[in-house]
Image (cartoon, grey):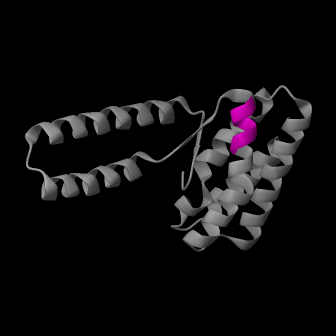
Amino acid sequence: MKELEDKLDHLYTNLQSREKYYHLKSVKNFISNIDHIQNEKDKILAYNILLTYLDIVNENGIFSNKESRKVFIDYIEPLGLIFKKHMKYYFLILPSSLVLVAIILNLVFFLFTKSALVFLVFNSIFLILYLILMLFLRKGNVYCYNY
């Protein structure tokens, strides 16, 4: 366990400005909760995936969104599935992505309808979704792309 924390600390100290590419908050959530996995086989699998991930990103780094997507698919997503199975982890989209979708849809609605009721209902739904996402993020049992 200490080895994973040391490698994560090493990664934090050597990062420049590309933090989002590394999914550090998700990795930190996994490391801090790995001991809560009851199934020993899955705990060892999660530990080995985390160790491999940290070794790869410490050695090579991640310099693009394409590389970030690849390590997410190869390492973070399988970890998320293990944690989802044992600890009720959830995959979420980031609230900033939800806001971007809301802005785009607001513009589309503005072009096709001028009804204030449509805007009110639509934005109320998005506000509720945003608050739910923030609640889940605060709870900590989540993993996200670029989180």
Where residue 123 appears, as percent x and y from the top left, is 23, 39
Tell which of 24 and 71 is nearer to you: 71
Tell which of 95 and 139 is nearer to you: 95
Is 53 magenta? The answer is no
* Residue at image coords 34%, 53%: 101
Q: Quadrant of residue 43?
A: top right
Quadrant showing the N terminus: top right
Tell which of 23 and 133 is nearer to you: 133
Q: Which residues are magenta?
A: 80-85
**Residue furthest out toward the front:** 112
* Left or right: 31 as drawn, with respect to 46: left
* Residue at image coords 76%, 70%: 59
* Left or right: 3 as drawn, with respect to 80: right
* Left or right: 98 as drawn, with respect to 88: left
Q: Quadrant of residue 30?
A: top right
Q: Is residue 30 above or below residue 104?
A: above
* Residue at image coords 73%, 65%: 58
* Left or right: 119 as drawn, with respect to 53: left
Q: Is residue 125 above or below residue 4?
A: above
Q: Main secondary structure of the magenta part?
A: helix
Where residue 114 appears, as percent x and y from the top left, is 8, 49
How many numbered tags mark residues here?
0
Where residue 138 appears, as percent x and y from the top left, is 48, 32
* Residue at image coords 37%, 48%: 98
Q: Quadrant of residue 79?
A: top right
Q: Is residue 87 above or below residue 147?
A: above
Is 81 magenta? The answer is yes
